Image (cartoon, grey):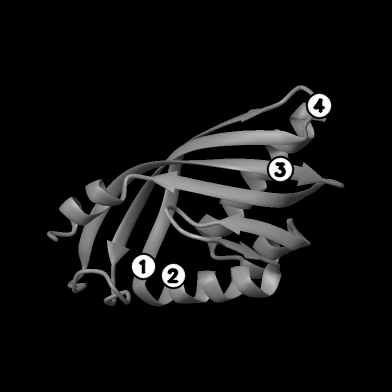
Amino acid sequence: MQAATTDLIARYYAAFNARDWEGFFALLTDDVAHDLNQGARETGKAAFRLFIDRMNASYSEQIVDISVTASPGGARAAAEYVVLGTYLKTDEGLPPASGQTYRLPGGAFFEIRDGLIARVTNYYNLQDWLRQVGA
């Protein structure tokens, strides 16, 4: 189960990087919990899709240098990564966008149920991102 979970998380990031949104959402449970960095929990694929659509309107990102660790039974996993991004369009409540690029370390925690991702909790340093985009 540990190897299957590691593979699942690798496929999640591969789909994200390929912008294969149907493949990406196929890896999630219908009731997936998505914990936003320094924000609220959103529940369900529909809410996650709205989040991705909002992000894609303002940011172009690739996830690189990914390291995944899974629990022995495969029920949980953690990933450390680096986000390479471009701030394309001003996101509500954030500084103006003008094509600024950023390199931002981050991490995520996952819960796995029935071979699918049931929870994603993301963390990154918002103050570092704000500094990089010139806030």
Callout 2, which amino acid? Met
| SS for callout 3 | strand
| SS for callout 1 | strand
Callout 4, which amino acid? Gly
Task: Looking at this view, name the residue that lies furthest to the top.
Answer: 72
Asked if residue 93 lies left or right of residue 31, the reply is: left
Which residue is under mark 1? 59
Q: Position of residue 74 (x, y in %)?
A: 77, 31
Separation of marks 1 and 2 at Cα, in angstroms: 6 Å
Which residue is under mark 3? 111
> Mark on residue 73?
4
Separation of marks 2 and 3 at Cα, in angstroms: 23 Å
Q: Position of residue 113 (x, y in %)?
A: 82, 46
Asked if residue 119 lies left or right of residue 105, the reply is: right
Tell me which residue sits at (36%, 67%) in the image: 59
Q: What is the crowding at mark 1: few (fewer than 14 residues within 10 Å), some, or many (at least 20)? A: many
Task: Say which label, 3 or 1, has the lower sequence index.
Answer: 1
Which residue is under mark 2? 55
Tell me which residue sits at (29%, 62%) in the image: 86
Separation of marks 4 and 1 at Cα, in angstroms: 35 Å
Q: Nearer the viewer, residue 48 or 64?
A: 48
Q: Position of residue 30 (x, y in %)?
A: 78, 65
Q: Are marks 4 and 1 in contact (CB under 8 Å)?
A: no
Of the two numbered discs 4 and 1 in the rendering, the one whose residue sits closer to the viewer: 4
